[in-house]
Image (tube, grey):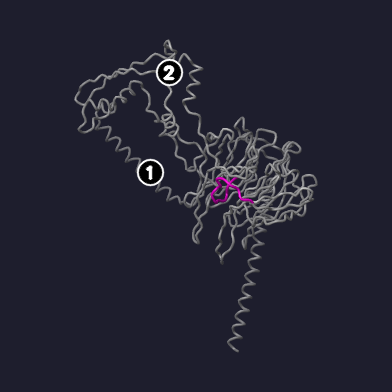
Amino acid sequence: MGKKGKEKKKGRGAEKTAAKMEKKMSKRSRKEEDDLEALIAHFQTLDARKTKITETPCAPPSARLNASLSAHPEKDELILFGGEYFNGQKTFVYNELYTYNIRKDTWTKVEIPGPPPRRCAHQAVVVPQGGGQLWIFGGEFASPDGEQFYHYKDLWVLHLATKTWEQVRSTGGPSGRSGHRMVAWKRQLILFGGFHESARDYVYYNDVYAFSLDTFTWSRLAPSGLGPSPRSGCQMSVTPQGSIMVYGGYSKQRVRKDVDRGTQHSDMFLLKHEEGGEGRWVWTRINPSGARPSPRSGFSVAVTPSQQTVLFGGVCDEEEEESLEGVFFNDLYFYDAAKNRWFAGQLQGPKSEKKKRRRGQAEEPAGADGRELGPAGAPAPLEVVKEVVSEDGTVVTIKQVLQAPGPAAQAPSEEDAGAREASRPRVEPCPRSSAMLAVKHGLLFVYGGMFEAGDRQVTLNDLYCLDLHRMEEWKALVEMDPKTQEWLEETDSDEDSDSARDAEAGDEDQDEDSEEDSGAEPEEPQHPEMAPREQRVDALARTEQHGLKLACDAPEPGAEEGKAPKRA
């Protein structure tokens, strides 16, 4: 009896300890949330000092991820709002508003009184009403150390015509969250999913809400059928048939104490509004065919002019108990709802140089260099004569007649054109996740995002564009070198040692070059040496093009390619 009594007391003691810990954690969580609210209020006080609208031409915005990029419904502009940046030690969250003029390729920072608090991982939807409106819901604010999070449940609208912010207060809306998805459906905003994280726990959602743009009221929908499991970061878009498609996403669950397991979803659902049924919705799971995207999270989504959904990039996390490594993507996939089919986005490449030269000939029949044209309309041949001194002092004259590019002689074979195109540096966004995507006039724009290089997170501010009608090649509008980014995990001593090693390597290279220059004969830089056991006739044939190159004073084909900067 005594032993059992001790066990009961011990059990009650453990329960009391757990209850005290729970109370302590709850109190700590409330304190952290209060601290974040105080910090947010401080930033709002600073924003309140802005009393007038200012538009300032500026350089491209700083590097960021989890912002929103939206196409203006009436102007040739993109609208960038919010986002976050992490430099290794500190997290920065923004509420800046930028516009990008597509035709002029210029950025403008727009400061408007009374903006929403700083946030990232929110949702932004553009509607054409009233000259254009940008609706923003939710998102999160992170403490500078990145350990605490405050999730918003507020709704804002930016009136694009008057450039004014307005907070729309309505009860019955979604709880505070980030990573949710929101689309415009008829005259409503439909919101799905997301997550909320605190110091104590986290929760993922699969609820659905509708906000009426006519009555400015929230309502929670209760669709029938089996819908998606709770998740965040999914793909959500409206199909041409009027349904709402939900694909993929990410969620995690606790498998045991302090151990979480993430899930990258790859299922797809349709949310349909039943005709004749007031407020009745139904979930249906679908199984699309075609080339599906590989499992991933953090991808970006936009809708093309043909009402296809385009998916870009993302990351596939390979989780272990003690580590997390990610494989990043920069591929494109299109989903055609009418065919219920996925398509991999294949770029056709730029038009061959062959076609470009033919057009150039038609426009310039007299020849670009002004040489006299023959009876067939072709420039006259060019005779090249070069005297080369061999090793034993013999002077060898190299004489060759070069055919100038003409209608028949200038057109290279398809193999040569293909090789030339393949050797040209390929322009494309580097693999990334959490990028911003928008489509305007059939042009797909990709801005920012992040990828990981070892233990370092590289945040981007580059901007790329792709013509979705031609699907030829990416165009870099803003390029960025990730090496120029600030990262504060490395100590100054490590950087100094790296610089010292680089300096020593540079001195060694310079010494080697000086030794080679001092021992070289004057003729050697102008003519290659003969190979061992090589006949003079063979050597002359081998080095003939070198002599011609000197005579024409033209660089080797592809010599400029070595100057192309390496991409991360």
Assess whether mark 1 and mark 2 are in contact (beta carbons under 8 angstroms): no
Question: Residue at image x 40%, y 34%?
Answer: 562
Q: Of marks 2 and 1, which one's residue comes earlier in the chain?
A: 2
Q: Is residue 270 left or right of residue 324?
A: right
Q: Residues within 10 Å of mark 2 (few under 14, many from 20)?
A: some
Residue 540 in the image: x percent, y percent?
Answer: 25, 25
Q: Which residue is mark 1?
A: 502
Camera-near label (2 vs 1) is 2
Question: Residue at image x 27%, y 34%?
Answer: 516
Secondary structure at badge 2 equals loop
Residue 179 in the image: x percent, y percent?
Answer: 63, 51
Residue 132 in the image: x percent, y percent?
Answer: 72, 38
Which dot marks residue 406?
2
Q: In the picture shown, does residue 58 fall above or below 497?
A: above
Q: Is residue 389 left or right of residue 198?
A: left
- The residue type indicated by label 1 comes to Asp
Secondary structure at badge 1 equals helix
Q: In the picture shown, does residue 403 fall above or below 222?
A: above
| Residue 263 counted in the magenta span | no
- The residue type indicated by label 2 comes to Gly
Q: How many marks?
A: 2
